[in-house]
Amino acid sequence: MSTSPSIRTENLSIHFGGHAAVNNVTCAFHPGELTVIVGPNGAGKTTWFNLVSGQLRPTQGRILLGERDITTLSPSQRARAGIGRAFQLTNLFPKLSVFENVRLAVQGKARQGHRLLARTAALTTLTEKAMDFLEQTNLAAVAELPAAALPHGDQRKLEVAMLLAMEPDIFMFDEPTAGMSVDEAPIILELIARIKRDSSRTILLVEHKMDVVRALADRIVVLHNGELVADGDPTEVMDMELVRDIYLGTGTDEVA
Ligand SMILES: Nc1ncnc2c1ncn2[C@@H]1O[C@H](COP(=O)(O)OP(=O)(O)OP(=O)(O)O)[C@@H](O)[C@H]1O
């Protein structure tokens, strides 16, 4: 890939007691690329995600956003720097309406951009933008309901709407369709596919479902026992003997 990496981890490790949950992981990701991180249960996928988005601090190694070392930044500083992670519902304000949740996310982004719009014009723009994200995620009909009143699948969609509103450079999704019905999952997958069409974004996705991996991955990174054991073209990686060995016995439908 000719562009310089948008985000990379260098020799990244974290130890819990004597156990290396992530062990010396070096990898770089580029704009316009969707990478799926796979690996069996306990491989270190979520821990690596937590290191990148700032919930955990590494025992060793660095994380670079472009050329900026963000290893010691807090999660909110990283979010402002352009790392957006869907957080399995912990980002939602349950008592606020669906619309208000998204408008807050839009507002946060606008404030960051130091917009010089007149106050009323700015408010109209924010409202229109928020409604647009709700329409994209099929949530316009429930815009006035409190977030807490939504079924689980709609709450996951709301989270994606808020993530879209934040317009990050790096999108991080941890099993975005988990707990969703077969009707709901395609909406999220289509949204992710749409983000992918924007060549300035980098998408990192932890996913177990093979159909999702096949549909979206430009590249697969395999973690096993905290180590990066394979990285490359999806078909080639899934064909590697080592990867097949890791997944032996896990069935054909799920990669982890
Ligand atoms: N806070 C913690 N304290 C101690 N051990 C931890 C902690 N967080 C994760 N681990 C351990 O680190 C290893 C990696 O866990 P992690 O949740 O990152 O795996 P994963 O690949 O995301 O698995 P899954 O697919 O089941 O979500 C596991 O052995 C786990 O028990």
Image (cartoon, rainbow, N blue to C red):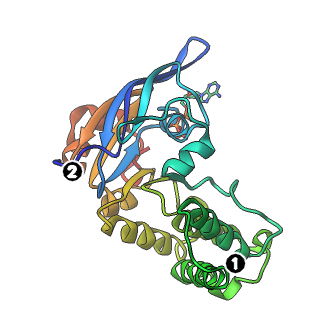
The amino acid type found where label 2 is placed reads Thr
View extreme (bottom): residue: 141
Residue 140 drawn at (x, y percent):
63, 85
Q: Which of marks 1 and 2 is nearer the N terminus?
A: 1
Q: Note whether residue 225 is visible.
A: no
Query: Splitting the image into four quadrants, where does ligand 1 fall?
Result: top right
Helix, strand or loop at mark 2: helix
Q: Are marks 1 and 2 in contact (CB under 8 Å)?
A: no
View extreme (left): residue: 2
Q: Please state if 220 lies on the left or on the right of 40 as rendered.
A: left
Quadrant housing the C terminus = top left
**Above or below, 149 relative to 227:** below
Q: Which residue position holds label 2?
A: 235
Label 2 environment density (alpha carbons within 10 Å; few <14, some 14–19, many ≥20) = few
Q: Note whether residue 202 is visible.
A: yes
Residue 169 drawn at (x, y percent):
42, 55
Residue 144 drawn at (x, y percent):
76, 83
The amino acid type found where label 1 is placed reads Phe
Residue plotted at (78% across, 80% down): 145
Residue plotted at (26% across, 45% down): 238
Front-lying residue, 164 or 115: 115
**Which one is closest to the eye, mark 1 or mark 2?**
1
Front-lying residue, 62 or 210: 62
**Above or below, 29 relative to 103:** above
Q: Which residue position holds label 1?
A: 99
Q: Please state if 173 lies on the left or on the right of 222 as rendered.
A: right
Task: Report the number of discs.
Answer: 2
Quarter of the figure with residue 98: bottom right
Helix, strand or loop at mark 1: helix
